[in-house]
Image (cartoon, grey):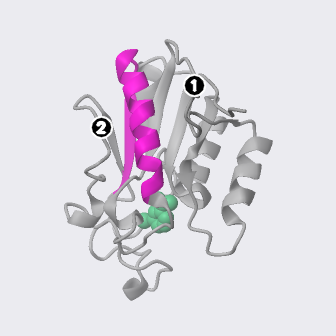
Amino acid sequence: MSTETSIEPVSGDALLIVDVQNDFLPGGSLAIAEGDQIIPVLNRYIKIFQGAQLPIYATRDWHPANHCSFNDQGGIWPKHCVANTWGSAFATTLRLPDTTVIISKATTADKDAYSGFEGTDLVEQLRAANIKRLFVGGLATDYCVLNTVKDALKKNFQILLLQDAIRAVDINSGDGERATAEMHKLGAISEKLLTEKPP
Ligand code: VGL
Ligand code: ZN
């Protein structure tokens, strides 16, 4: 039996890709287990949205070298996603179209931001483009995906969580599952696309 669901994005929908950057992938400084496995899945969503001429947004963690979240500044994370370095670049295998709207966050030393809405113009951009529903994938389920989705729901966007295109840091085992449960409780719906090949 196939678990595949066909998605058909319509006008008012957008794809929101959260922080698919080298430092969050195997080989990066804050590598998320299996983080790279979401890339081919995201590429299929990108193709679908591109084909339907629907907008694609990509957030990125974009820190100065002395960011407050880094261990050497007293923060809880290893140094990661320093602006304009290899670690902050989007995965080269992620086929982002040139028209992708890039949203940089946590760009000043003194403030961290897990949500793509925090300290950015994402909500203004989405409203100007008449977006009502966001298809969300990326990294990490328990940090930036969770906080971005919570803010989006508060701002009255509908959320379709791309369950096969997210992965968690899981500092405590189960963090990712708890984050997903919380997003569902707040109104997000999960979608699974193409995890099994059709017969
Ligand atoms: C993230 C930890 C630190 C994320 C960003 O993108 O989920 N996690 N900074
Ligand atoms: Zn960060």
**Span shown in magenta:** 36-61
Query: Who is closer to the viewer here, 40 or 162?
Result: 40
Do tag 1 and tag 2 residues touch (Cβ < 8 Å)?
no
Q: Indicate the amino acid at tag 1.
A: Arg
Q: Residue at x 44, y 74 (%)?
A: 69
Give the image quarter of residue 82.
bottom left
Asked if residue 196 is positioned above or below residue 73 in the image, the reply reads: above
Q: Position of residue 98 (x, y in %)?
A: 22, 32
- Dot 1 or dot 2: first in sequence order is 2
The image's mark for residue 133 is 1
Res 121 seen here = no
Q: Tag 1, which secondary structure? A: strand
Q: Position of residue 123 (x, y in %)?
A: 48, 33
Q: Tag 2, which secondary structure? A: loop
Name, please, the residue furthest toward the right: 185
Residue at mark 2: 96
Asked if residue 86 is positioned above or below residue 4 in the image, the reply reads: below
Q: Is residue 137 left or right of residue 106?
A: right
Q: Is residue 40 magenta?
A: yes
Q: Residue at x 53, y 58 (%)?
A: 140
Q: Residue at x 80, y 43 (%)?
A: 185
Q: Residue at x 59, y 28 (%)?
A: 199
Res 58 seen here = yes
Q: Indicate the amino acid at tag 2.
A: Leu
